[in-house]
Amino acid sequence: MSPAILFTFVIAYFLLLLTVAWFTSRGSDNESFFIGNKKSNWMLVAFGMIGTSLSGVTFVSVPGGVGSGHFFYFQVVLGYLLGYIVIAFVLLPLYYRLNLTSIYAYLNSRFGEKAHKAGASFFILSRTVGATARLYLVINILQIFILDKLGVPFMATAFVILLMILLYTFEGGVKTIIYTDTLQTAGMLLGLVICTIVILKALGTDLSGAFQTLSSEGYTQIFNTDFKSGSYFIKHILGGMFIAIAMTGLDQEMMQKNISVNRLKDAQKNMMSFTAVLMLVNFMFLFLGGILYLYANKMNLPTGNPDDLFPTIALSEPFSGTIGVLFIIALISALFPSVDGAITSLTSSFCIDILKIREKQTDEAKQKKTRLGVHIGFALLFFILVLMFKAINDKLIIDFILKMAGITYGPLLGLFAFGILTQKNINEKLLWTVCILAPILTLCIDMLSSPEWYEKKLHIELGISQCSESIFGGYKIGNELILINGLLTFAGLLVITQKKKSNDAAGRI
């Protein structure tokens, strides 16, 4: 199928999103933008959150990673299950009890304003880096397989896609993306199922036969028992648990949707039903990755860059006319929920936590003007960072996202854990010192453990391989990086503890 026809489908899909946004944003105000007036349907929230959690990275990098990592990624997914249980039965009750619009207001009630701004600042940093990495991956695929052939430059592609997202989130915010994310999750899952069926048919087998073949070739191995490996099962499960807690439970984007539901019980039902479906869908992506490699081996197709495997097969003959359109629709369906929610939540957090417009601006019209300006500002920041990723041209983006999450979400994990698990207060003057030193120490430890990862990604020679071997003995830090960071933050907060009555006992369990 020609690039022009594929591009026509992309435009038609976007017009559909604009139509949904127009209907859902009518009569919207600041409360609609920030928390959907707390009237969101929990079933829609749960379904839409699947698309937000998976994103284009899952759609492309998880299947591509099966070639070298087997089904080891499912160890991380098992960790997610444990993390989501903590979110549903520890964090959500806390957020609802304090009636929060921004979850980082908890840190204010527990420690003070500096802690509040520190939590919001690390969220803004973490979500900005992660969301732009996901955005770059999908834009780059659209660019390589469609828009390069139409003579459209990468910069123009990135600008237009961000403009699209800005247009349909501009007014409605959370109220709108609850519905658009539901639509987009449906598109992504439909694409996943149909693409799997078509590849199975091309292989001349069924689910059972394909699974037997994958097992015989070693693709379906889930648990890695090599203690020194970065994907050792305990590391992956523990890392997945704390990644879920930090990237979902301590993330304004994800929790903004949860607390837009009126009742705590409905929010908990949302969280657990979302968890069950997410586990199934991740396994389906791993299975799809396995059969894509079977097909590539059968047809002697190149498998050098894992992120290019799925789009290369889907958009090449003989599939371009059958699953090509579905792949593109599913891919942008995976892209938009992760980016529209990110820009909306970043706008909310910056306005409420940093600018404090609710406290300083009593006029609804002034609040809206500030909010719209911040919203446009974040869209421009995303545009700049996507161009930076293009310059770096990183491979297998999911590795980068998990690594950066471990480094940037650690202070959030440590701050919330310290607030919930202890009754101690801290010297706020030293708070930023702890929150900056912990990630720096974590980064140094990780670089010492895995210098080759940084040498490959940053294209520099660190020259510490021998030192790494003598200290770690071949041990590679994996997804437990975020736990190390959180523990260092927690320990630092213990050091700066001061004897003083807590500001508010409501934040402790």
Image (cartoon, rainbow, N blue to C red):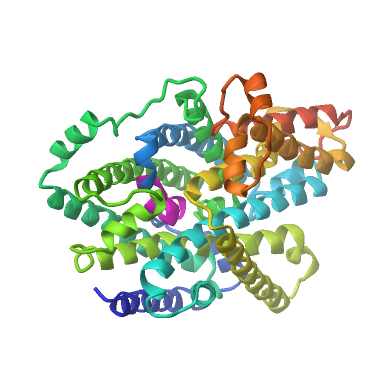
Vertical arrangement, residue 157 with respect to residue 439, above or below: below
Stretch of the chain drawn in magenta? 51-63
Task: Report the side of 78 relative to 210 (left or right).
Answer: right
Who is closer to the viewer here, 259 or 55?
Answer: 55
Q: Is 55 included in the stretch rendered in magenta?
A: yes
Residue at 44 percent of width and 53 percent of height: 57
Q: Where does the C terminus fall, quadrant-wise? A: top right
Residue 157 seen in render: yes
Q: Identify the image quadrant of residue 422.
A: top right
Left or right of residue 473, residue 153 in this image: left
Residue shown at the point (52%, 78%) measured from the top left: 156
Name the residue at 61% across, 39% down. Answer: 406
Question: Residue 496 lies in what quarter of the image?
Answer: top right
Q: Is residue 349 above or below residue 240?
A: below
User: How many marks do you count on the picture?
Assistant: 0
Q: Is residue 435 magenta?
A: no
Give above or below for 336 relative to 434.
Answer: below
Image coordinates for residue 215, horizontal then vertical, percent:
23, 30
Q: Quadrant of the N terminus?
A: bottom left
Is residue 267 rendered to the left or right of residue 455? left
| Magenta segment, prevailing SS (helix, strand or loop) | helix
- Snapshot quadrant of residue 414: top right
Q: Measured along the vertical axis of the image, is residue 278 above or below residue 3?
A: above
Q: Position of residue 175 (x, y in %)?
A: 50, 66
Percent position of residue 413, x then y = 65, 37
31 vs 80, nearest the viewer: 80
Does residue 419 appear in this view? no
